[in-house]
Image (cartoon, helix red, strand yellow):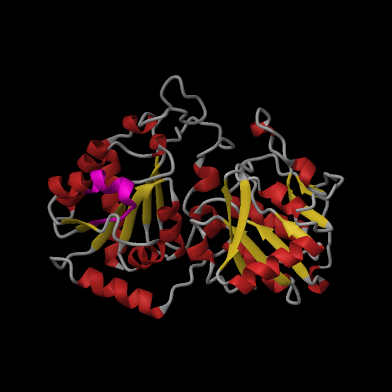
């Protein structure tokens, strides 16, 4: 691919690209499932603001099954690195060929990287490689000054050097482009047969009480609650609500935790390793509440308007602009959400947990957590 030289321009004033008349827009959203769900209000607003444009969305392979049904874009493609080479793959060969032709011909009017957080996935470089006349994203926050810079890939940047929710940052970027947000509600797009299958699977579980999903996994060990602490909290919740049933969901890597929970708790079942991401979403959307970590399932539940409680490794004394901060990443939606944090970070952690295993989450108080979750679940099942 041809690398196009660009001259970065940093500004906080609105840059109107006349979105209504653009013909081709590339959105590079290369991060995780939760990040993508938080970007759905941005994509909805972009579609309404650029009705004539062919919008191509680039996502990671893990996100592709979720993003593929997005109604706000025309093409969804998966981007991966294999042996140092970037691979772009669409749902069909013609889709893949079309995007590659556009890259080669530099047909994009605008490339956007809607991610305020650090560009760990090198989406800015891909935006630049697209040959778009304008490549737009956020200027690198001072918090990440120790990491390699990437703003030189942009032709225009928006600076927002303060803590705010990722949804708010993304919608500010849309306004910076001259677009108009269409609300801040998150969205999921499920097919009727997927929801019916989820209902059928849940109906087959023993018992008749409300079902609460348990998602014990996260992208990093430090973001997870130790299994024994999680069991202790869930045991207390079950003692407060005897009729409750737990359903553990996750990948194969969470099976040991799922087996431990199902062996220690009554009315606890597991589909761990038995569902793909779309089946997982349908199951979460069909249950009464979710208990999870600071991870994708919490955002899925929020988007599905399912009450959610998440455990965070971010101490209440942490800098709100830092990684894992609930100010930036808490579940956001119409349903009630609860973030359970350590009172303070444990030494040597300061603003956020930097351990390679369970660390700051070990100080989360069990009795208080169980009571807060009990109250949330009771409100959820009373509706």
Nearer to me, 51 or 193: 193
* Residue at the image position 24 percent from the left and 44 percent from the top: 256
Residue 93 horizontal/vertical position (percent): 60, 71
**In this rendering, position of residue 233 left or right of residue 26:** left
Name the residue: 63% across, 51% down: 86
Residue extending furthest toward the top: 348
* Quadrant for the C terminus in the image: bottom left
- Residue 122 as seen in the image, left or right of residue 319: right
Is residue 381 in view from this perspective? yes
- Relative side of 162 to 208, left or right: right
Q: Position of residue 288 (x, y in %)?
A: 30, 64
Q: Residue at x 82, y 73 (%)?
A: 21
When the figure is inspected, residue 70 is found, relative to residue 212, above or below; the finding is: below
Residue 352 against residue 112 in the figure, above or below:
above
Residue 320 on the magenta segment:
no
In this picture, which residue range is highlighted in magenta? 247-258
């Amino acid at each position: 691919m041809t690398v196009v030289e660009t001259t970065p321009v940093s500004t906080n004033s609105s840059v109107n690209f006349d979105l209504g008349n653009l013909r081709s827009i590339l959105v590079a959203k290369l991060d995780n499932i939760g990040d993508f769900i938080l970007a759905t209000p941005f994509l909805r607003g972009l579609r309404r603001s650029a009705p004539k444009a062919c919008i191509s969305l680039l996502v990671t392979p893990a996100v592709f099954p979720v993003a593929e049904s997005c109604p706000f874009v025309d093409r969804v493609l998966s981007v991966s690195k294999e042996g140092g080479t970037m691979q772009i793959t669409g749902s069909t060969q013609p889709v893949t060929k079309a995007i590659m032709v556009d890259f080669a011909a530099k047909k994009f009017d605008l490339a956007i990287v809607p991610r305020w957080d650090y560009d760990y996935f090198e989406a800015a470089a891909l935006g630049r490689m697209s040959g778009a006349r304008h490549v737009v994203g956020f200027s690198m926050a001072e918090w990440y000054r120790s990491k390699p810079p990437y703003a030189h890939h942009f032709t225009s940047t928006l600076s927002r050097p303060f803590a705010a929710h990722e949804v708010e940052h993304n919608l500010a970027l849309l306004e910076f482009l001259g677009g108009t947000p269409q609300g801040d509600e998150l969205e999921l797009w499920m097919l009727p047969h997927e929801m019916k299958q989820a209902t059928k699977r849940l109906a087959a579980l023993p018992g008749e009480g409300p079902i609460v999903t348990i998602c014990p996994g996260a992208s990093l060990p430090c973001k997870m609650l130790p299994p024994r602490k999680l069991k202790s909290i869930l045991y207390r919740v079950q003692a407060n609500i005897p009729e409750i049933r737990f359903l553990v969901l996750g990948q194969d890597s969470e099976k040991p935790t799922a087996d431990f929970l199902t062996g220690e708790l009554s009315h606890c079942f597991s589909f761990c390793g038995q569902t793909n991401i779309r089946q997982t979403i349908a199951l979460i959307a069909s249950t009464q509440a979710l208990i999870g970590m600071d991870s994708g399932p919490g955002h899925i539940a929020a988007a599905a308007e399912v009450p959610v409680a998440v455990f965070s490794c971010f101490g209440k004394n942490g800098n709100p602009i830092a990684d894992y901060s609930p100010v930036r990443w808490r579940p956001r939606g119409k349903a009630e959400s609860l973030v359970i944090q350590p009172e303070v970070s444990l030494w040597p952690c300061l603003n956020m947990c930097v351990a390679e295993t369970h660390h700051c989450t070990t100080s989360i108080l069990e009795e208080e957590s169980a009571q807060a979750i009990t109250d949330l679940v009771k409100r959820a099942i009373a509706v």
